[in-house]
Amino acid sequence: MKPKYSFINILTGSDLSTRRLALMEMKSPKAGPVIWLTGAVHGDEVGGIIIIQEVFKRLQKYKLLKGSVYALPLMNPIGFETVTRGLVIGRDDFNRSFDLNRSFPGDKYGTLAERIAFTIFNKILKSKPTLVLDLHNDWVNSIPHTLMDPYPGVKYKAVYETTKNYAFNIGLPVINELEEREAVLELKHSLSGALLARKIPTLTLEIGGASPVSSIAKEKDVADGVKAIWDLLTSLNMVQLIKQDFNYKQPDIFKNRILKYSHQPDASTSGIVVYVAKPGDLVKKGQPVAKIYNVFGKVQETLCAQKDSLLLGHSDFSVAFPGADLVSFGIL
Ligand SMILES: [Zn+2]
C-alpha cells in the first residue's frame, strides 16, 4: 500500500502567488474511520512532522486494515522556516494574526494566518473526520500528555464523551485545558476548539519539547508519539497491534482519569530558579518544586505544589520574574 503525497494551495491576499501545504493520504480499500494527523501549527514545534512521517512509514510496512489516515505534517511552513511559533504578518488583533492556532476556523479573506486556517479547516471538514490528532511540543523539560479542550456545555456532551474515550485509548496522562474564561475564549480559535464546536472529536498531543533555544525532534519523543498514535489506530481496528512501551511509564493512577491543568503558583519575585522536582514526579500538596535565589544565593521564594499533582513540566529557563509561569501540573 502506497501513500499519496500532494499539496494544497493557499492564496495570498494579493493573489500574486500561492503557498503550499503538504498533504499525505493513506487509504484502505475497506471503509472505516477517517483519522487526521496535523503537525507544526506552531512553526517551532517540529516533533509532529517526524512523528507523522514515521507513522506513514509504518502504514506502508504494516497494512492499513480499514479507513483512511490523512496528514498535514507542516501547517505553518512560514513559522517553521523562521523557527517561530506564529506568523508575524498581518493585523494584530487578539493574537490571531500571528498565532495560527488562534486563527481557526479561519477566514478566506483574512490575514495570512486566517487564510491558512480556513484552508486547513475546510479540507479537514470535507473528509467527514472521525478524529483529529493535533501534534504539539511543550517545554523541553516536560512529559508527553494528551490535552482535552474544556467541557463546552451540554450541547456538546456526546462529542465530549467520545473524545474522552479516544483520549483514554492513547495511554498518556489526559489533561483538561485551562478553564478560565479568557482561555476558553482563546481556545475557541484553536484547531481543536473550532473542530469541537463542529462536533468533531479532536485531541492535542503534547509530545516532547520546543523552546526558543532548542527546537529539535528527539528520537525518544518521536517513538512515544508513534506509539500513542499507533495504539489509537489499533483500538479502532485500523492496524495490527505492535508491542512497544512509552519511554515515560504511566503509573496506573492516571488511567481513565482527566487531570486538571494548572500552572499555579507563578513566581512572585525575580531571581534565579533551581527546580527541585522533575517532570513526571508525583508531588504532594505543599511539596517544594522550585526555589528562587537572589544573586548572592539567598532563597527569595520557594514554590510549592498547591495540590497533589503530576508534575507535567517546568520552564526551560532559570530566570524568574513576578508572574513567570515556571511549572505546570496535572492536579490529581
Ligand atoms: Zn503548540
Image (cartoon, rainbow, N blue to C red):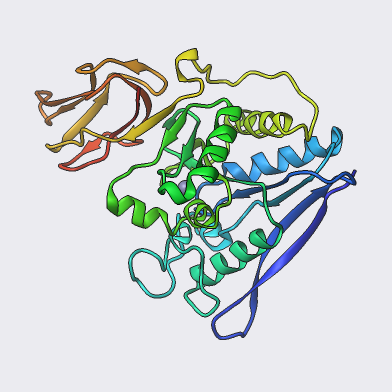
Task: Name which quarter of the figure residue 307 lies in.
Answer: top left
> Residue 308's spot in the image, x, y percent?
29, 19
> Residue at (44%, 71%) from the top-left corner?
89
Q: Is residue 200 left or right of residue 110?
A: right
> Residue 4's spot in the image, x, y percent?
83, 54
> Residue 99's spot in the image, x, y percent?
43, 60
Q: Nearer the viewer, residue 105 or 279?
A: 105
* Residue 135 visible in rendering: no
> Residue 63's spot in the image, x, y percent?
86, 35
Q: Quadrant of the C terminus?
A: top left
**Total number of numbered discs in the rendering:** 0
Seen from this angle, which residue lies furthest front? 154
> Residue at (62%, 30%) from the top-left corner?
228
The correct choice, above or below, for 99 with respect to 301 in the image is below
Q: Nearer the viewer, residue 254 or 299?
A: 254
* Residue 306 visible in rendering: yes
> Residue at (53%, 16%) from the top-left corner?
249
Q: Is residue 269 left or right of residue 56?
A: left
Q: Is residue 103 left or right of residue 125?
A: left
Q: Is residue 11 left or right of residue 56?
A: left
